[in-house]
Image: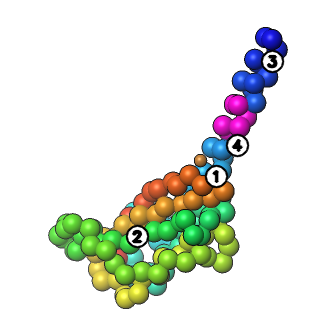
């Protein structure tokens, strides 16, 4: 009985660590977090896991015009899968004017748990 209990504990610990590894993490983005530059034609988000495109997505909002913070203003953008299943593309439909932007992403991979996060960058 004692042996059985220990085996079960080990097995559930293993299961938990397998699930945790399946959560997508944002590894990098273009533009990168906190950067300041020219208006990007598209924003690339690179994750640690393959994404399920139909459950994953993003919203692009402008949070500040130069020198003036305001409530988040949604920007029109097309969200699509990148050239590989770990990449999400956010393509603004109109050129982004100068200001601060936030990409609020939601990434879902094989274990179906939605993971959210955001990336902030500035356009000069
Ligand atoms: Cu999960």
Residue annotated with mark 1: 111
Which of marks 1 and 4 precedes in the sequence? 4
Residue annotated with mark 4: 18
Write the residue at 22% across / 74% down.
Answer: 66
On the question of residue 11 being in view, the answer is yes
Q: Which residues are magenta?
A: 12-17
- Other-residue count near label 3 (Cα within 10 Å), few / some / many at <14 / 14–19 / ≥20: few
**Which one is closest to the eye, mark 2 or mark 1?**
1
Cα separation, mark 4 vs mark 3, equals: 21 Å
Residue 75 in which image quadrant: bottom left
User: Coloured how?
Assistant: rainbow
The label number, if any, that marks residue 59 in the structure image:
2
Q: Position of residue 20 (x, y in %)?
A: 63, 43
Which of marks 3 and 1 precedes in the sequence? 3
Residue annotated with mark 3: 4
Q: Position of residue 12 (x, y in %)?
A: 70, 31
Which of marks 1 and 2 precedes in the sequence? 2
Q: Secondary structure at mark 2?
A: strand
Cα separation, mark 2 vs mark 4, equals: 29 Å
Which of marks 3 and 4 precedes in the sequence? 3
> Disc 1, ligand 1: is the CB inside 8 Å?
yes
Which of marks 4 and 2 precedes in the sequence? 4
């Amino acid at each position: 009985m004692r042996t059985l209990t220990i085996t079960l504990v080990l097995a559930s610990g293993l299961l938990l660590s397998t699930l945790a590894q399946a959560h997508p993490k944002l590894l990098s983005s273009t533009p990168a977090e906190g950067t300041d530059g020219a208006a990007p034609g598209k924003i690339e988000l690179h994750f640690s896991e393959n994404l399920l495109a139909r459950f994953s997505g993003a919203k692009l909002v402008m949070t500040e015009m130069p020198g003036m913070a305001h409530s988040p203003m949604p920007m029109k953008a097309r969200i699509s899968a990148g050239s590989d299943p770990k990449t999400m593309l956010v393509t603004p439909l109109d050129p982004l004017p100068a200001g601060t932007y936030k990409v609020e992403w939601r990434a879902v991979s094989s274990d179906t748990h939605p993971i959210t996060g955001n990336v902030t960058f500035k356009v000069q």
